[in-house]
Image (tube, grey):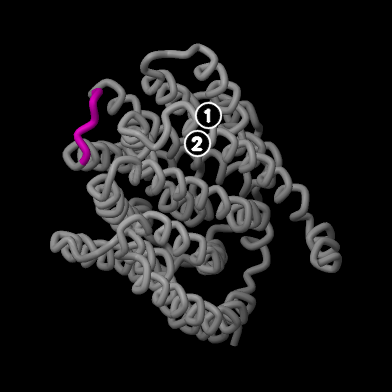
Protein backbone atom coordinates (compact mmCIF):
# COMPACT_ATOMS: atom_id res chain seq x y z
CA UNK A 1 0.00 0.00 0.00
CA UNK A 2 2.82 2.41 0.86
CA UNK A 3 4.41 1.65 -2.51
CA UNK A 4 1.12 2.56 -4.24
CA UNK A 5 0.92 5.90 -2.40
CA UNK A 6 4.57 6.60 -3.24
CA UNK A 7 3.89 5.89 -6.91
CA UNK A 8 0.84 8.18 -6.89
CA UNK A 9 2.83 10.99 -5.30
CA UNK A 10 5.59 10.55 -7.84
CA UNK A 11 3.14 10.60 -10.76
CA UNK A 12 1.52 13.84 -9.61
CA UNK A 13 -1.90 12.19 -9.28
CA UNK A 14 -2.13 12.19 -5.48
CA UNK A 15 -3.17 15.83 -5.08
CA UNK A 16 -5.92 15.75 -7.73
CA UNK A 17 -7.22 12.40 -6.43
CA UNK A 18 -7.42 13.70 -2.85
CA UNK A 19 -9.22 16.84 -4.03
CA UNK A 20 -11.70 14.71 -5.99
CA UNK A 21 -12.20 12.39 -3.00
CA UNK A 22 -12.97 15.39 -0.77
CA UNK A 23 -15.53 16.61 -3.30
CA UNK A 24 -17.19 13.20 -3.47
CA UNK A 25 -17.31 12.99 0.34
CA UNK A 26 -19.21 16.30 0.36
CA UNK A 27 -21.49 14.88 -2.33
CA UNK A 28 -22.24 11.81 -0.23
CA UNK A 29 -23.13 14.00 2.75
CA UNK A 30 -25.39 16.04 0.46
CA UNK A 31 -27.25 12.94 -0.73
CA UNK A 32 -27.73 11.75 2.86
CA UNK A 33 -29.16 15.17 3.80
CA UNK A 34 -31.57 15.10 0.86
CA UNK A 35 -32.79 11.66 1.89
CA UNK A 36 -33.09 12.99 5.44
CA UNK A 37 -35.34 15.80 4.21
CA UNK A 38 -37.44 13.92 1.68
CA UNK A 39 -36.92 10.23 2.51
CA UNK A 40 -37.29 7.63 -0.23
CA UNK A 41 -40.68 9.15 -1.06
CA UNK A 42 -42.80 10.38 -3.96
CA UNK A 43 -41.44 13.91 -3.34
CA UNK A 44 -37.87 12.64 -3.71
CA UNK A 45 -38.92 10.80 -6.86
CA UNK A 46 -40.14 14.14 -8.27
CA UNK A 47 -36.80 15.80 -7.48
CA UNK A 48 -35.01 12.91 -9.14
CA UNK A 49 -37.05 13.42 -12.32
CA UNK A 50 -35.56 16.92 -12.73
CA UNK A 51 -32.09 15.70 -11.80
CA UNK A 52 -32.56 12.76 -14.19
CA UNK A 53 -33.26 15.29 -16.95
CA UNK A 54 -29.95 17.02 -16.23
CA UNK A 55 -28.25 13.63 -16.02
CA UNK A 56 -29.49 12.26 -19.36
CA UNK A 57 -28.63 15.54 -21.11
CA UNK A 58 -25.20 15.37 -19.49
CA UNK A 59 -24.71 11.94 -21.05
CA UNK A 60 -23.71 13.90 -24.15
CA UNK A 61 -20.84 15.38 -22.11
CA UNK A 62 -18.87 12.26 -23.00
CA UNK A 63 -19.28 13.15 -26.67
CA UNK A 64 -18.56 16.81 -25.95
CA UNK A 65 -15.33 15.91 -24.18
CA UNK A 66 -14.17 13.33 -26.71
CA UNK A 67 -15.26 15.46 -29.67
CA UNK A 68 -13.46 18.52 -28.31
CA UNK A 69 -10.32 16.45 -27.64
CA UNK A 70 -10.35 15.42 -31.31
CA UNK A 71 -11.33 18.80 -32.76
CA UNK A 72 -9.02 20.93 -30.61
CA UNK A 73 -6.12 19.14 -32.26
CA UNK A 74 -6.81 21.28 -35.34
CA UNK A 75 -9.47 23.89 -34.44
CA UNK A 76 -9.80 26.88 -32.12
CA UNK A 77 -12.13 26.87 -29.11
CA UNK A 78 -14.59 29.09 -30.98
CA UNK A 79 -14.69 26.82 -34.04
CA UNK A 80 -15.05 23.77 -31.84
CA UNK A 81 -17.92 25.40 -29.93
CA UNK A 82 -19.78 26.23 -33.16
CA UNK A 83 -19.40 22.61 -34.27
CA UNK A 84 -20.59 21.08 -30.98
CA UNK A 85 -22.92 23.31 -28.97
CA UNK A 86 -25.82 23.80 -31.45
CA UNK A 87 -26.10 20.03 -31.84
CA UNK A 88 -25.88 19.75 -28.07
CA UNK A 89 -28.87 22.08 -27.71
CA UNK A 90 -30.88 19.93 -30.11
CA UNK A 91 -29.99 16.86 -28.07
CA UNK A 92 -31.02 18.66 -24.84
CA UNK A 93 -34.45 19.37 -26.32
CA UNK A 94 -34.91 15.76 -27.40
CA UNK A 95 -33.63 14.30 -24.12
CA UNK A 96 -35.79 16.52 -21.92
CA UNK A 97 -38.83 15.73 -24.08
CA UNK A 98 -38.06 12.03 -23.71
CA UNK A 99 -37.97 12.30 -19.90
CA UNK A 100 -41.11 14.45 -19.88
CA UNK A 101 -43.15 11.91 -21.83
CA UNK A 102 -41.76 8.96 -19.89
CA UNK A 103 -42.03 10.29 -16.32
CA UNK A 104 -44.62 13.12 -16.38
CA UNK A 105 -43.04 15.65 -13.97
CA UNK A 106 -45.20 17.88 -11.77
CA UNK A 107 -43.69 21.21 -12.95
CA UNK A 108 -43.15 22.21 -16.58
CA UNK A 109 -41.12 25.25 -15.46
CA UNK A 110 -38.67 23.13 -13.48
CA UNK A 111 -38.35 20.79 -16.47
CA UNK A 112 -37.37 23.77 -18.62
CA UNK A 113 -34.82 24.83 -16.00
CA UNK A 114 -33.39 21.30 -15.99
CA UNK A 115 -33.08 21.33 -19.78
CA UNK A 116 -31.20 24.65 -19.83
CA UNK A 117 -28.98 23.52 -16.95
CA UNK A 118 -28.12 20.30 -18.79
CA UNK A 119 -27.08 22.23 -21.92
CA UNK A 120 -25.00 24.68 -19.88
CA UNK A 121 -23.18 21.66 -18.43
CA UNK A 122 -22.01 20.91 -21.99
CA UNK A 123 -20.59 24.42 -22.28
CA UNK A 124 -18.83 23.91 -18.94
CA UNK A 125 -17.35 20.54 -19.98
CA UNK A 126 -16.07 22.02 -23.25
CA UNK A 127 -14.30 24.79 -21.33
CA UNK A 128 -12.89 22.37 -18.73
CA UNK A 129 -11.48 20.10 -21.45
CA UNK A 130 -9.91 23.01 -23.35
CA UNK A 131 -8.32 24.45 -20.20
CA UNK A 132 -7.01 21.06 -19.04
CA UNK A 133 -5.68 20.23 -22.49
CA UNK A 134 -3.82 23.55 -22.64
CA UNK A 135 -2.08 22.82 -19.33
CA UNK A 136 -4.40 24.63 -16.87
CA UNK A 137 -5.31 21.42 -15.08
CA UNK A 138 -5.60 22.57 -11.47
CA UNK A 139 -7.77 25.63 -12.09
CA UNK A 140 -10.18 23.67 -14.30
CA UNK A 141 -10.17 20.69 -11.95
CA UNK A 142 -11.06 22.73 -8.87
CA UNK A 143 -13.87 24.50 -10.73
CA UNK A 144 -15.12 21.10 -11.85
CA UNK A 145 -15.30 20.07 -8.17
CA UNK A 146 -17.28 23.19 -7.23
CA UNK A 147 -20.83 21.68 -7.30
CA UNK A 148 -20.44 19.66 -4.10
CA UNK A 149 -18.90 22.63 -2.29
CA UNK A 150 -21.80 24.90 -3.28
CA UNK A 151 -24.65 22.40 -2.94
CA UNK A 152 -23.91 21.17 0.57
CA UNK A 153 -24.46 24.49 2.40
CA UNK A 154 -27.46 25.13 0.14
CA UNK A 155 -29.07 21.82 1.06
CA UNK A 156 -28.40 22.49 4.76
CA UNK A 157 -30.01 25.95 4.47
CA UNK A 158 -33.10 24.49 2.78
CA UNK A 159 -33.38 21.87 5.54
CA UNK A 160 -33.20 24.57 8.23
CA UNK A 161 -35.95 26.57 6.48
CA UNK A 162 -38.43 23.70 7.08
CA UNK A 163 -40.25 24.32 3.80
CA UNK A 164 -43.46 22.46 3.09
CA UNK A 165 -42.23 21.64 -0.42
CA UNK A 166 -38.43 22.01 -0.71
CA UNK A 167 -38.25 20.31 -4.14
CA UNK A 168 -38.35 23.53 -6.26
CA UNK A 169 -35.61 25.23 -4.22
CA UNK A 170 -33.41 22.13 -4.23
CA UNK A 171 -33.85 21.77 -7.99
CA UNK A 172 -32.94 25.44 -8.57
CA UNK A 173 -29.72 24.97 -6.57
CA UNK A 174 -28.66 22.33 -9.09
CA UNK A 175 -29.73 24.53 -12.02
CA UNK A 176 -27.45 27.41 -10.96
CA UNK A 177 -24.25 25.36 -10.74
CA UNK A 178 -23.12 25.44 -14.41
CA UNK A 179 -23.70 29.22 -14.57
CA UNK A 180 -21.22 29.74 -11.72
CA UNK A 181 -18.73 27.26 -13.19
CA UNK A 182 -18.80 28.81 -16.68
CA UNK A 183 -18.17 32.28 -15.26
CA UNK A 184 -15.17 31.00 -13.30
CA UNK A 185 -13.76 29.02 -16.24
CA UNK A 186 -13.94 32.05 -18.51
CA UNK A 187 -11.79 33.90 -16.00
CA UNK A 188 -9.04 31.23 -16.37
CA UNK A 189 -6.63 32.10 -19.17
CA UNK A 190 -5.79 29.00 -21.26
CA UNK A 191 -2.19 27.92 -21.75
CA UNK A 192 -0.30 28.30 -24.97
CA UNK A 193 -0.57 25.52 -27.57
CA UNK A 194 2.02 25.20 -30.29
CA UNK A 195 1.06 21.77 -31.61
CA UNK A 196 0.83 21.03 -35.32
CA UNK A 197 -2.47 19.85 -36.85
CA UNK A 198 -3.02 16.10 -37.07
CA UNK A 199 -2.49 14.39 -40.40
CA UNK A 200 -6.03 12.97 -40.64
CA UNK A 201 -8.82 15.38 -41.63
CA UNK A 202 -12.48 14.85 -40.72
CA UNK A 203 -15.67 16.89 -40.86
CA UNK A 204 -15.99 18.72 -37.55
CA UNK A 205 -19.65 17.94 -36.93
CA UNK A 206 -19.12 14.36 -38.11
CA UNK A 207 -16.64 13.71 -35.28
CA UNK A 208 -19.06 15.03 -32.67
CA UNK A 209 -22.07 13.21 -34.14
CA UNK A 210 -20.11 9.96 -34.11
CA UNK A 211 -19.33 10.42 -30.41
CA UNK A 212 -22.94 11.48 -29.80
CA UNK A 213 -24.38 8.17 -31.00
CA UNK A 214 -23.26 6.62 -27.72
CA UNK A 215 -25.03 9.40 -25.82
CA UNK A 216 -28.30 8.48 -27.56
CA UNK A 217 -27.79 4.93 -26.34
CA UNK A 218 -27.15 6.23 -22.83
CA UNK A 219 -30.30 8.35 -23.00
CA UNK A 220 -32.41 5.37 -24.02
CA UNK A 221 -30.88 3.12 -21.38
CA UNK A 222 -31.31 5.61 -18.53
CA UNK A 223 -34.91 6.11 -19.57
CA UNK A 224 -35.52 2.37 -19.51
CA UNK A 225 -33.71 1.87 -16.17
CA UNK A 226 -35.36 4.77 -14.37
CA UNK A 227 -38.86 4.08 -15.67
CA UNK A 228 -38.37 0.48 -14.53
CA UNK A 229 -37.31 1.77 -11.11
CA UNK A 230 -40.28 4.15 -10.97
CA UNK A 231 -42.69 1.30 -11.68
CA UNK A 232 -40.99 -1.09 -9.25
CA UNK A 233 -42.09 0.82 -6.14
CA UNK A 234 -42.05 4.14 -4.28
CA UNK A 235 -38.53 5.35 -3.58
CA UNK A 236 -36.81 2.88 -5.94
CA UNK A 237 -36.20 5.59 -8.53
CA UNK A 238 -34.66 7.83 -5.85
CA UNK A 239 -32.37 5.00 -4.66
CA UNK A 240 -31.25 4.15 -8.21
CA UNK A 241 -30.72 7.80 -9.18
CA UNK A 242 -28.69 8.61 -6.07
CA UNK A 243 -26.64 5.42 -6.47
CA UNK A 244 -25.81 6.21 -10.09
CA UNK A 245 -24.76 9.76 -9.15
CA UNK A 246 -22.44 8.36 -6.49
CA UNK A 247 -21.16 5.78 -9.00
CA UNK A 248 -20.32 8.60 -11.39
CA UNK A 249 -18.63 10.47 -8.54
CA UNK A 250 -16.40 7.47 -7.77
CA UNK A 251 -15.60 7.19 -11.46
CA UNK A 252 -14.67 10.86 -11.40
CA UNK A 253 -12.14 10.16 -8.63
CA UNK A 254 -10.61 7.01 -10.07
CA UNK A 255 -10.68 7.75 -13.79
CA UNK A 256 -11.74 11.22 -14.91
CA UNK A 257 -9.30 12.97 -12.58
CA UNK A 258 -6.41 10.97 -14.02
CA UNK A 259 -7.71 11.52 -17.57
CA UNK A 260 -7.81 15.27 -17.00
CA UNK A 261 -4.33 15.17 -15.51
CA UNK A 262 -2.96 13.17 -18.45
CA UNK A 263 -4.61 14.94 -21.40
CA UNK A 264 -1.68 17.26 -22.01
CA UNK A 265 0.92 14.46 -21.75
CA UNK A 266 -1.07 11.91 -23.80
CA UNK A 267 -1.40 14.29 -26.73
CA UNK A 268 2.40 14.79 -26.69
CA UNK A 269 3.51 11.18 -26.12
CA UNK A 270 1.68 9.44 -28.99
CA UNK A 271 2.22 6.06 -27.35
CA UNK A 272 -0.56 3.67 -28.33
CA UNK A 273 1.51 0.64 -27.31
CA UNK A 274 0.74 1.37 -23.65
CA UNK A 275 -3.01 1.20 -24.30
CA UNK A 276 -2.56 -2.17 -25.99
CA UNK A 277 -0.67 -3.53 -22.98
CA UNK A 278 -3.37 -2.34 -20.57
CA UNK A 279 -6.09 -4.04 -22.60
CA UNK A 280 -4.25 -7.36 -22.42
CA UNK A 281 -4.19 -7.17 -18.62
CA UNK A 282 -7.85 -6.20 -18.24
CA UNK A 283 -9.84 -8.75 -20.22
CA UNK A 284 -9.65 -11.81 -17.91
CA UNK A 285 -10.45 -9.93 -14.64
CA UNK A 286 -13.42 -8.28 -16.34
CA UNK A 287 -14.81 -11.66 -17.45
CA UNK A 288 -14.44 -13.09 -13.92
CA UNK A 289 -16.28 -10.15 -12.34
CA UNK A 290 -19.00 -10.31 -14.99
CA UNK A 291 -19.58 -14.01 -14.27
CA UNK A 292 -19.87 -13.52 -10.50
CA UNK A 293 -22.18 -10.51 -10.88
CA UNK A 294 -24.40 -12.46 -13.29
CA UNK A 295 -24.80 -15.28 -10.76
CA UNK A 296 -25.81 -12.78 -8.06
CA UNK A 297 -28.27 -11.10 -10.44
CA UNK A 298 -29.95 -14.38 -11.38
CA UNK A 299 -30.17 -15.51 -7.75
CA UNK A 300 -31.39 -12.31 -6.07
CA UNK A 301 -32.31 -9.73 -8.70
CA UNK A 302 -35.90 -10.91 -9.12
CA UNK A 303 -36.78 -11.32 -5.44
CA UNK A 304 -39.24 -8.86 -3.94
CA UNK A 305 -37.49 -6.56 -1.48
CA UNK A 306 -34.04 -7.32 -2.90
CA UNK A 307 -34.40 -5.92 -6.41
CA UNK A 308 -33.09 -2.41 -5.72
CA UNK A 309 -30.32 -3.59 -3.39
CA UNK A 310 -29.15 -6.27 -5.83
CA UNK A 311 -29.02 -3.62 -8.54
CA UNK A 312 -26.90 -1.47 -6.23
CA UNK A 313 -24.52 -4.40 -5.58
CA UNK A 314 -24.12 -5.09 -9.31
CA UNK A 315 -23.41 -1.39 -9.88
CA UNK A 316 -20.63 -1.55 -7.28
CA UNK A 317 -19.20 -4.63 -9.01
CA UNK A 318 -18.95 -2.71 -12.28
CA UNK A 319 -16.29 -0.32 -10.95
CA UNK A 320 -13.61 -2.41 -12.67
CA UNK A 321 -15.03 -1.37 -16.05
CA UNK A 322 -13.74 2.17 -15.43
CA UNK A 323 -10.48 1.10 -17.07
CA UNK A 324 -12.27 0.74 -20.42
CA UNK A 325 -13.16 4.44 -20.26
CA UNK A 326 -9.54 5.42 -19.57
CA UNK A 327 -8.19 3.39 -22.49
CA UNK A 328 -10.82 4.80 -24.85
CA UNK A 329 -9.83 8.34 -23.89
CA UNK A 330 -6.14 7.55 -24.25
CA UNK A 331 -6.65 6.27 -27.80
CA UNK A 332 -8.87 9.22 -28.78
CA UNK A 333 -6.35 11.71 -27.42
CA UNK A 334 -3.62 10.32 -29.68
CA UNK A 335 -5.56 9.39 -32.83
CA UNK A 336 -8.80 10.34 -34.61
CA UNK A 337 -10.40 7.07 -35.73
CA UNK A 338 -13.98 7.58 -36.90
CA UNK A 339 -14.33 3.85 -37.41
CA UNK A 340 -13.62 3.17 -33.73
CA UNK A 341 -15.88 6.00 -32.57
CA UNK A 342 -18.81 4.80 -34.67
CA UNK A 343 -18.41 1.17 -33.61
CA UNK A 344 -18.14 2.13 -29.94
CA UNK A 345 -21.19 4.39 -30.10
CA UNK A 346 -23.31 1.97 -32.12
CA UNK A 347 -22.69 -0.69 -29.49
CA UNK A 348 -24.12 1.70 -26.89
CA UNK A 349 -27.15 2.44 -29.04
CA UNK A 350 -27.72 -1.19 -30.06
CA UNK A 351 -27.53 -2.56 -26.52
CA UNK A 352 -29.88 0.16 -25.25
CA UNK A 353 -32.38 -0.59 -28.01
CA UNK A 354 -32.34 -4.31 -27.21
CA UNK A 355 -32.82 -3.63 -23.49
CA UNK A 356 -35.63 -1.18 -24.26
CA UNK A 357 -37.50 -3.77 -26.29
CA UNK A 358 -36.88 -6.50 -23.71
CA UNK A 359 -38.13 -4.25 -20.90
CA UNK A 360 -41.53 -4.02 -22.58
CA UNK A 361 -42.10 -7.63 -21.57
CA UNK A 362 -41.55 -6.77 -17.90
CA UNK A 363 -39.06 -9.64 -17.65
CA UNK A 364 -35.97 -7.55 -16.85
CA UNK A 365 -35.19 -6.36 -13.33
CA UNK A 366 -33.05 -3.30 -12.54
CA UNK A 367 -30.09 -5.54 -11.61
CA UNK A 368 -30.16 -7.27 -14.99
CA UNK A 369 -30.32 -3.97 -16.83
CA UNK A 370 -27.34 -2.68 -14.86
CA UNK A 371 -25.36 -5.89 -15.42
CA UNK A 372 -25.77 -5.72 -19.19
CA UNK A 373 -25.02 -1.98 -19.47
CA UNK A 374 -22.30 -1.44 -16.89
CA UNK A 375 -20.47 -4.79 -16.97
CA UNK A 376 -21.15 -6.89 -20.11
CA UNK A 377 -21.20 -4.04 -22.64
CA UNK A 378 -17.82 -2.56 -21.58
CA UNK A 379 -16.19 -5.96 -22.17
CA UNK A 380 -17.48 -5.98 -25.76
CA UNK A 381 -16.31 -2.38 -26.21
CA UNK A 382 -12.88 -3.23 -24.82
CA UNK A 383 -12.53 -5.90 -27.49
CA UNK A 384 -13.63 -3.37 -30.10
CA UNK A 385 -10.95 -0.92 -28.97
CA UNK A 386 -8.32 -3.68 -29.07
CA UNK A 387 -9.27 -4.64 -32.64
CA UNK A 388 -9.11 -1.04 -33.89
CA UNK A 389 -5.97 -0.32 -31.92
CA UNK A 390 -4.12 -3.05 -33.81
CA UNK A 391 -5.00 -1.29 -37.06
CA UNK A 392 -3.86 2.09 -35.73
CA UNK A 393 -0.55 0.62 -34.58
CA UNK A 394 0.00 -1.07 -37.94
CA UNK A 395 -0.67 2.23 -39.75
CA UNK A 396 1.75 4.04 -37.41
CA UNK A 397 4.48 1.47 -38.10
CA UNK A 398 3.97 1.81 -41.85
CA UNK A 399 4.18 5.61 -41.55
CA UNK A 400 7.49 5.35 -39.66
CA UNK A 401 8.84 2.91 -42.24
Q: Are marks 1 and 2 in contact (CB under 8 Å)?
A: yes
The residue positioned 37% from the left and 62% from the top of the image is 370
Q: Which residues are the magenta region?
A: 103-107
Query: x%, y% of residue 306?
Result: 37, 58
**Could you say which quadrant of the image residue 103 lies in?**
top left
The residue positioned 67% from the left and 67% from the top of the image is 269
**Residue at mark 1:** 182
State how many labels appear: 2
Which of 118/235 is in front? Answer: 235
Dot 1, how many residues are within 10 Å of its Cα: few (below 14), some (14-19), or many (20+)? many
Give the answer, above or below, for where 180 lies relative to 336: above
Q: Residue furthest left?
A: 361
The residue positioned 19% from the left and 42% from the top of the image is 102
**Residue at mark 2:** 124
The rendered magenta stretch, by its main secondary structure, is classed as loop
> Residue 203: in sight, yes or no?
no
Which of 297/290 is in front? Answer: 297
Amino acid sequence: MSALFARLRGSGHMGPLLASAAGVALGLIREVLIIGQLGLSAANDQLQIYLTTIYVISLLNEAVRLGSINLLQKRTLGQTSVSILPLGLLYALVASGFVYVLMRPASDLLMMGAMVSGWLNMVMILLVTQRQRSGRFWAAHLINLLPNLVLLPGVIAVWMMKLKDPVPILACLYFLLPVIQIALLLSVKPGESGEAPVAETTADRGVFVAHGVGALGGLLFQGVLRSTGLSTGEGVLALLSISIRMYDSVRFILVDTIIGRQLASWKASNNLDQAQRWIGKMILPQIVVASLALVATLLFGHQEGLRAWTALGVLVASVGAFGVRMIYYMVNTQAVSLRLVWQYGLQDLGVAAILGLASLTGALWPAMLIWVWYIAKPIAQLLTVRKNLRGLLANAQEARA
